Amino acid sequence: MKLSKLTITIAIALLGAIAITTLTNNPFNSFMTRSNRNDNTSLDSMIDAVVVQPSQLVTQWIVSPAEAKYLIEQGAVILDVRDRNSQKNGMLQGAIGISWQQFSQSKFPHQGNLLEDELALTQQLRNVGVFSNKAVVVVGDPLNGWGEDGRIVWMLRTLGHQQTVLVDGGYSALAKTGLPMTRTVSQKAAAVPGDFVIQRVSDWEITQEKLRTGLATTQNLVVIDAREPREFAGATPYGEQRGGHIPGAISLHYKELLDVEGKLLPRGKILALLQDRNIKSDAIIVSYCTGGVRSGWLTSVLVDLGFQAQNYAGSMWEWSAGPANQNFLD
């Protein structure tokens, strides 16, 4: 059968499109995705040239300091999750001081889970100025914190806010961009309440019951323990009922993905680190820690890299308090 030149041309074009799509959707093909972070481009040369389109934030959960500056100058809400003492030493003008606990349950062992009452959760988010159609920039302290900025980003994305981002390098990196600062103690409520409406997305969270089922039935499920190695080995410094780790979990302390300045390692190094732990691009990744904070940060990073990632917010507080004949630990 003879093929016309037109048919051959169309076939080649289709094959090329399929190949590009495949490469783009694979997080390990970093050369086809957004440029690597920490590529030694000077911050000063980038700041004035940066433009961030709302559409790109749908899949981009982490922004550079220059991108964060642009968003803030365009009216983004700033949420500062650092501790009170750090805030007293300086904050961005207009930032609202928050904690992850104010959006979470208070009773043990479920304090890692988000508030069950969606009306109360909605009110909390509106009180700190979260709007449905306005970007939210979350500022943390990568070196001294617990990944609270990633937890808040994971929370808001899970609740349906598509323009919430954390800043690579946190407050200290963003402070170098020239944004106006203040030493006034942080506000706890916005001058103008937001209008955010929860539209929950199930893609990035997993419950205790679903994790139990997944461990037994999902072949490509990978569980990551984002805690310190001592906790993985059985230490219980934060009130867990039992020590150990979920069977089959991979130990990956979340701070292994940061450099000495609190910035994310270059994309290629992070992907190599994941490959060394045999974490494949098609895996469904569930992360946990003590109360879903460190694992929330790790989930945000993994989703930004293009992985299918979920945070088990109940984490070890909840899992270790469950029945030992169902919630196994090694």
Image: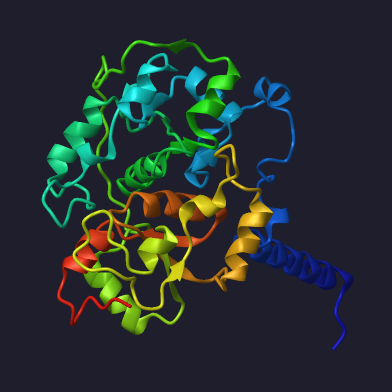
Please state if 94 lies on the left or on the right of 262 as rendered: left
Please state if 168 lies on the left or on the right of 268 as rendered: left
Look at the image and tell me whether residue 303 can be seen: no
Residue in front for this viewpoint, 195 or 259: 259
Q: Residue at x 28, y 50 (%)?
A: 200
State the scheme by which the image is colored: rainbow
Q: Position of residue 49 (x, y in %)?
A: 69, 23
Question: Disc count in the image?
Answer: 0
Q: Position of residue 268 (x, y in %)?
A: 68, 55
Q: Residue at x 69, y 45 (%)?
A: 35
Look at the image and tell me whether residue 289 can be seen: yes
Please state if 235 lies on the left or on the right of 15 as rendered: left
Residue in front for this viewpoint, 145 or 46: 145
Q: Quadrant of the N terminus?
A: bottom right
Q: Quadrant of the C terminus?
A: bottom left
Tell me if residue 31 comes above or below residue 181 in the rendering.
below
Please state if 30 lies on the left or on the right of 106 as rendered: right
Tell me if residue 32 comes above or below residue 279 in the rendering.
above
Q: Residue at x 21, y 56 (%)?
A: 239
Residue lying furthest bottom in this view? 1
Q: Residue at x 47, y 53 (%)?
A: 254
Q: Position of residue 90 (x, y in %)?
A: 42, 17
Q: Position of residue 61 (x, y in %)?
A: 49, 43
Residue 217 occupies which quadrant of the picture?
A: bottom left
Residue 311 occupies which quadrant of the picture?
A: bottom left
